[in-house]
Image: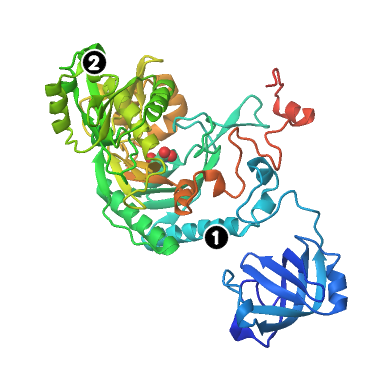
Amino acid sequence: MRTHTCGELREKNSGENVTLQGWIDAIRDHGKMVFISLRDRYGVTQVVLANTELIEKASEFGGEYVVQVEGMVRERPSGMRNLSLDTGGIEVVASQMKLLSPSDVPPFVIKDPITAKDELRMKYRYLDLRRPSMQKKLLMRSQLINTVRTYLSERNFLEIETPYLTLTTTEGARNFVVPSRNFNGKFYSLAQSPQIYKQLLMIAGVDRYFQFARCFRDEDQRADRQPEHTQIDLEASFVDEDDIMNLVEGMISAVFENILGIKIRAPFERLTYRNAMEKYGSDKPDARFDVYISDVTDIAKKSEFRIFKEAKFIKAITVPPLTRKNIDELSEFALKYYNSKISYLSFRETLSGNVAKFFSPELSGELKSALSISGEKTVLFCAGDWKRSLETLGAVRNKILVGETPKEQYKLLWVTDFPLFEWDGETGGWMPCHHIFTMPKTDDFVDPSKVTGKQYDLVLNGTELGSGSIRIHDRVLQEKMMEIGGMSKEKRDREFGFFLSALTYGAPPHGGIAIGLDRLLMILSGENSIQEVIPFPKTLTGTGLMENVPSEIEDEKLKELGISITQNR
Ligand code: ASP
């Protein structure tokens, strides 16, 4: 129906007769002449109406009307070029114009940058998506998928789908459930990830699998969480950790190159979980900044400050001088979110800070040289157990660094050697840190806190992009790990019986990873929330404002499912 898109015409097309179709982005009435900016996914072209009949017709049109324009391309006089448009060197002088579809007045102006509130954007997502910046992200999403698909297909990976309607898996979140009509009282769970299926595919001899998998997790929403998200999920047989890490480094490099035209350095830095925590106070450190945490236990214990004297660990972070107000805010934050107290010393002309009086000049000198302090600096301390004191300072570090200019734009790294189990004070048992299928690095399980796993997390600019591991391929070991993780034999057999049995029929050594596609795209497109890169996202409370979900269903349907609602929230 059209000869060109609205982003296509250039000076070289001058003199050609063309037909364009698109949305009216703007109409400017200059009396004898009317200018229409015609928009589609590819760009905006200026259309000139110079005869009275067309001008009359256009007076009935408004923004977002869909029209067809026929006319001749002409070069714009040099002073009239619009350098901000790719088509800015030309305009189309209309000879005919046809209305294809009118539009009601949209609830917000469809322009970048958007001023409408998020709720309105979500309710009319199809209008929000018309904005050029949103179209660009949809394009990027598609390019990202194509790059990954090509990269993996070229390396013998088969793209295979796995069921969404399945049983409860163990990715650590709650499952969304789907009631069965044929078996009242029974439920499917929506897959939290294809974990078990991809392992079964390895047992099935597929050797190399990938999938752009939708994962459903019913958890409390945060800025980088959604009830459904997409993972680049992959698994391979006869591999070790290095094989998967090298493969992923190549894949991520191809993505950066194809999408941003940026070459990134591989291999990526590798940090053990312990080192990441000790250095950055986080298992997903933002290593674009040279600000590190130090252990000052031995020195600070010599001070007269009672809390330090009694503490097991005292960690410190040295930062450019902070104001009293900054410190109060950080202390409040640490108390609220980490239930931890922050103390501080300010090295200026004189020593100040809430613990200054407990430090003799010799001791503060010793600290200063241990922390290699030169010039004016503030040292923030957190005393307590190992994990909490580090996590507190890690979070404080991130807060201080917000808005600072990083020394590099993208920093990718691996975190390895995670502990497999963590003591859960609430249940009084050991909980798997990742999932229960990760291969342990030792066969001595006397103290589960000491067992690390063949696990690797990929981190980009302080965001966990993905997590993977080499898997257990032996039934006895798999059952042992389930047992340590507190899973009863009955639950093991009921939920994982089929999988445990599969492990007994020649399971090859295998491993894999899943990378959050939305998170990766969020960072590539410079956004702060995955809502911005998911075509039809939910709000933070898991609501779809456009289609109004979750919603009630008819009594008739409830009856079919054998469900009665006893409580509405
Ligand atoms: N299934 C895991 C997850 O979704 C990733 C993996 O181990 O491959 O976190």
Q: Residues within 10 Å of mark 1 (few under 14, many from 20)?
A: some
Say which residue label 2 marks: 311
Horizontal and vertical percent for residue 517?
A: 47, 49
The reply to whether residue 144 is in sight is yes
Provide the secondary structure element on which disc 1 rests: helix
Quadrant in the picture for the N terminus: bottom right
Regarding ligand 1, which quadrant of the image does it lie in? top left
- In this figure, what is the number of numbered marks? 2
State the residue in front, 502 or 46. Answer: 46
Instruction: Determine whether 490 is above or below 5 in the image.
Output: above
What label sits on residue 217 in the rendered view?
none
Instruction: Determine whether 405 is above or below 9 in the image.
Output: above
Which residue appears farthest toward the front when viewing the image? 349
Which residue appears farthest toward the bottom when viewing the image? 15
Image quadrant assignment for residue 120: top right
State the residue in front, 383 or 250. Answer: 383
Find out if the beta carbon at label 1 lies less than 8 Å from the nearest ligand 1 atom: no
Sequence-first disc among 2 and 1? 1
Horizontal and vertical percent for residue 216?
A: 54, 38
Say which residue label 1 marks: 139
The reply to whether residue 417 is in sight is no
Provide the secondary structure element on which disc 2 rests: loop
Instruction: Determine whether 7 is above or below 272 in the image.
Output: below
The structure residue drawn at horizontal position 23% and vertical position 34%, both measured from the top left corner, is 441
The structure residue drawn at horizontal position 42% and vertical position 63%, both measured from the top left corner, is 258
Q: Is 370 displayed left or right of 182 in the figure?
A: left
Foreground: disc 2 or disc 1 = 2
Image quadrant assignment for residue 110: bottom right
Quadrant in the picture for the C terminus: top right
Find the distance from the CA under tag 2 to the CA under tag 1. 53 Å
Q: Is 559 displayed left or right of 125 in the figure?
A: right
